[in-house]
Each structure stands twice: as C-alpha cells, then as structure tokens.
Amino acid sequence: MDGIPDGYRNSGVKLRLVAVGTRLPDWVSAGFAEYARRLPRTMPLQLFEVPAANRRNQGLAQIRATEAAKLLAQVGGDDWVVALDVEGKTCSTEKLAEKLEGWRMRGSDVTFLVGGADGLAEDCLTRANETISLSAFTFPHALVRVILAEQLYRAWTLLTSHPYHRA
C-alpha cells in the first residue's frame, strides 16, 4: 500500500500558504518544496507569493494595507483562514495535528497568511478564522514558510502514525 490510512485516502483538503515576498533565497524554496512534496496528494500544500509593497514614500499602515489587499485577493470565499502572527496563540505539534484533523473533517480548504517584514494588517487578522504563532521567537518571514511546511508535514505524520514524528 501507499502508507496512507483509509480515512485519508479520499477526504482531502487543500492547504495554501499565501505569503508576502517573491525574491527569496533558493534554500527557502527548496526547504518549502521538500516538505510540501512529502504531503499526500489528498492534502497538497501550495505556495502563493505576493509581491511586497513598494516602501518608498509610504507609511507602515499603507504598506500593510497594500500587502493585505494582495494577500486577501488569494483567499477563497469558503477557505478557513489561519493568520500567522506574533500575537497569535502558540500550539504544539500535537495541537497542530488536532487542528489539521479538524480542518480535514470540516472539508474546506485552509489558507495560511504570512505577512511581510512588517507583519499583517488588521484586515488580514479580521478575516482570519484563527491566529497562531509558531514561536515566541521572531523568525524571518521567509523562514516561516519552511517551518510551517515542516510542521504541517510533521502533524500529518503524527496523525498517520508515520515514523517521522517520534513524540
């Protein structure tokens, strides 16, 4: 068999990461792609990049608003939206696995929003169904892509009793 439990075979959910930034180091793209590739076809993880706002002659509020409009344009009307924000609720890998199972059972696609260097605008936080923080540490927003992809893969392996997660 393919190692995918029967309950996961035909009940898929699409995971989408919508992130600010288009010119990132190769290692970011490679790291994200590696973990996205490992997820099953019934739970694909796709990356949608939006360009950062032009910082010239714009204040912080305008930069965030411009990026928010680009991020939110990528969100489907029925998507369950998870904003990644420093003020969000932290969760363990086990809790993320529970969330992943809940999202799968809900049946709607999940879109994760990652802001640029200045974070997310209030519009993104308001649209979000939930807000999480990956850590009390501050990470470069490009690294968040790799961390989130790895944690989603790890959560899936926990749910499917795959040996990658050895908690």
Image (cartoon, rainbow, N blue to C red):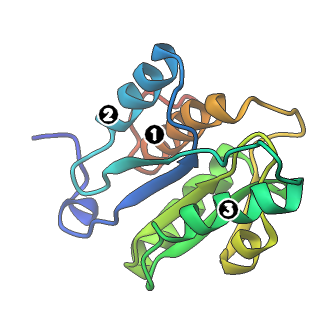
Q: Position of residue 115 (x, y in %)?
A: 69, 50
The residue singled out by tag 2 in the image is 38
Give me the residue at 67% from left, 56% from top. Answer: 95
Label 3 to label 1: alpha-carbon separation = 31 Å
Which amino acid type is shown beneath numbered disc 2?
A: Arg
Instruction: Reply above or below: 23 against 118.
Output: above
Q: Which mark is residue 56?
A: none
Q: Which mark is residue 153?
A: 1
Label 1 to label 2: alpha-carbon separation = 7 Å
Mark 1 near mark 2, Cβ–Cβ under 8 Å? yes
Q: Position of residue 19 (x, y in %)?
A: 56, 48
Mark 3 near mark 1, Cβ–Cβ under 8 Å? no
Instruction: Reply above or below: 165 against 4.
Output: above
Left or right of 133, for residue 116: left
Question: In terms of secondary structure, where does tag 2 sit?
Answer: helix
Which amino acid type is shown beneath numbered disc 3?
A: Thr
The residue singled out by tag 3 in the image is 66
Question: In terms of secondary structure, where does tag 1 sit?
Answer: helix
Instruction: Reply above or below: 157 against 126.
Output: above
The answer to which of marks 1 and 2 sits earlier in the sequence is 2
